[in-house]
Image (tube, rainbow, N blue to C red):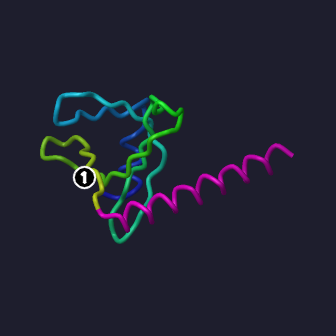
Amino acid sequence: MSEKDMLDAFDGIPLVELTGPDGTVFRFRYGAMIPYAGEEYAVLIELEPDPNGEEQILITRVEKAEDGNLAFVVAQEEDVIQTVFDKYVKLSVEAGLEDEADAE
């Protein structure tokens, strides 16, 4: 599945719900799709901030499940997590700078 196809799959989805092993449902908003090492990673931002008020970010690899739905596989490798997160921050900063330039 191409990045465009994955991005198109998010159209109309206001949030992503993931269910933990204990049945707890976590709700995330879509942050960005980041390509890295031949894979596509979705950056998901948890809707409920942690007790300190900080956003929780989850880095997931997006795969197409056998039933045709998207599956979000949580990245486990520290180098992948850090690199994808760094790319997401850079993308967010660049988008913020573009928004400021458009406002002027």
Residue lying farthest front?
52
- Magenta region: 77-104
Residue 94's spot in the image, x, y percent? 66, 57
Q: Secondary structure at mark 1?
A: strand
Return the residue nearer the eye: 67 or 77.
Answer: 77
Q: Quadrant of residue 16?
A: top left
Please state the horizontal and vertical placement of residue 82, each as a whole percent of the image. 44, 63
State left or right for residue 21 relative to residue 58. left
Whether 57 is among the magenta residues is no
Question: Where 11 sits versus 88, above or below?
Answer: above
| Pick the front one: 68 or 63 | 63
Label total for image: 1
Residue at horizontal 24%, vertical 28%?
Answer: 24
Q: Amino acid at mark 1?
A: Glu
Q: Which SS does the magenta portion mostly show? A: helix
* Quadrant in which residue 21 is drawn: top left
Quarter of the N terminus within the rendering? bottom left
Of 48 and 52, nearer the camera is 52
User: Which residue bears the numbered disc 1?
Assistant: 63
> Mark 1, residues whose alpha carbon is within 10 Å: few (<14), some, or many (≥20)?
some
